[in-house]
Amino acid sequence: MALDHRLTPEHEELRRTVEAFAHDVVAPRIGAYYEQHAFPYDIVREMAAMGLFGLPFPEEYGGMGGDYLALCLALEELARVDSSVAITLEAGVSLGAMPLYRYGSEEQKREWLPKLCSGEMLGAFGLTEPGFGSDAGGTRTTAVRDGDSWVINGTKCFITNSGTDITGLVTVTAVTGRTADGAPLISTIVVPSGTPGFTVAAPYSKVGWNASDTRELSFSDVRVPAANLLGEEGRGYAQFLRILDEGRIAISALATGLAQGCVDESVRYAGEREAFGRPIGANQAIQFKLADMEMRAHTARVAWRDAASRLLAGEPFKKEAAMAKLYSSDVAVTNAREATQIHGGYGFMNEYPVARMWRDSKILEIGEGTSEVQRMLIARELGLGRG
């Protein structure tokens, strides 16, 4: 298949619009939120007004009528400046709203999607559990049918967007039964915020992503209508595998943005900072570092756009998404380390964006499937057996 990753005029216009927003609105404000570990409600409201939360959804549900590429372009541009803002959008769309769009009934879509697309409400996806991070099949949360209700019990951890003032729902994975041989049947169920028995813990104290919302959730005899089941009972495992495959493209775009942001900041600094009577950018050692950083960011961009083009074309994309996520997250960590080195002591100071990027980069090798999981998925797609 011939690959052409040049953007259409519409996609390029969107990219430029978000690029300007990131530099003019996000960059001047986000540092204060980050140091205070505060959620940037005003920035999120402006993102909502731009229609970013509705980018890949049809207009009939309140969306912008765009596609997944549009979302990823926005994520890359936001992450060039700040990853907390970017992950708020990524999780709100690909994890909060996308499961409802992909698997919800028409009634569920019309009830929830307009609010999610407008940014009036954020959604979250309750998958990870204590002790079973990468082993999503080890779900221990249960949902038992009781008449016209599901009764949910269990705990989820590391859930993004789950405790903000505008969080409206969490889609939860839970065991709803067993197969004949005892294997768990996992389903997904929508739990509205404020449902009795649904408790949201205080925000985690994190190394990075400090202006995003991440919490532990607990469910104690939480009762929701049976109609809140998302898709078919017992199909939750297959559903979230698909959601994670798509989400890895989005995370790859975010990681690419962080990697490119490290280049942006380092080129600027190398032109301004003088040592021994000349800008440090005149030194070949710095030039070579920056050349390698730019090469890595460019290659990561090609990888995620390739995966996105396959998704949009309706072609298999699991392997390409895993490769893009694996490579771009590694690139983000490497570029952040090199950017810090170029900045020297200033790179260790929080007033410089590269310090924030360094702290934010590591989670990209962990969230939405660790690097080890990505290698496992790639190997399976190559036809290698389970070890």
Image (tube, rainbow, N blue to C red):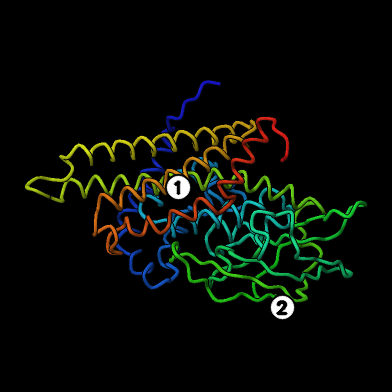
Q: Report helix, strand or loop for mark 2.
A: loop
Q: Which residue is mark 2?
A: 197
Residue 147: give its label.
none
Q: Amino acid at mark 1?
A: Ala
Residue 219 location in percent, x, y? 71, 73
Amino acid type at image mark 2: Gly
- Dot 2, crowdedness within 10 Å: few (<14), some or many (≥20)? some
How far apart are the alpha carbons under marks 2 and 1?
36 Å
- Which mark's residue is nearer the viewer, 2 or 1? 1
The residue furthest front is 387
Q: In the image shown, does 382 or 247 lie closer to the viewer?
A: 382
250 w.r.t. 122: above or below: above
Q: Are marks 2 and 1 in contact (CB under 8 Å)?
A: no
In the image, what residue occupies the spot 33% across and 69% down? 32
Residue 205 image point, x, y percent: 48, 71
Which comes sooner in the sequence, label 2 or label 1? Answer: 2
Q: Quadrant of residue 284?
A: top left
Q: In which quadrant will I find the C terminus? A: top right
Give the image location of residue 101, x and y in percent.
66, 50
The answer to whether residue 374 is above or below residue 90 is above
